[in-house]
Image (cartoon, helix red, strand yellow):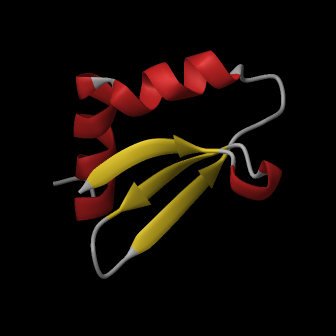
Amino acid sequence: MQIYYSNDNGEHCVYIDEGEHQHRIFLPEDVATLDARYFAQSEAANYVIQQLLKGGD
């Protein structure tokens, strides 16, 4: 699983690539790009996202 910030076509989202499945979390405009990139690289955020994708196990 890869998590990264994407601004392709002005989307401003965190992109989650699970291979067969891709997810985009669209961010509000007031979230700074630097903060979004930091979030996508954060180990804690990665863990939380993984748990949410598993259904909260």
Q: Position of residue 35 (x, y in %)?
A: 58, 17
Residue 33 lies in what quarter of the image?
top right
Q: Check the picture and name the quadrant holding the C terminus.
A: bottom left
Q: Write the residue at 37% across / 46% down.
A: 3
Q: Nearer the viewer, residue 52 or 12?
A: 12
Residue name at image x 69 percent, y 54 percent: 8
Tell me if residue 42 comes above or below residue 14 in the rendering. above
Q: Nearer the viewer, residue 10 or 39?
A: 10
Quadrant of the drawing holding the N terminus: bottom left
Seen at 70% across and 40% down, the residue is: 27
Quick check: 12 left or right of 41? right
Q: Residue 51, position in %: x, y?
A: 24, 49
Residue extending farthest left: 57
**Viewer-closest of 48 and 2:** 2
Where 36 falls versus 20 (above or below)?
Answer: above
Classify residue 16 as left or right of residue 31: left
In depth, the one of 30 and 33 nearer the eye is: 33
Q: Specify the farthest residue to the bottom.
A: 20
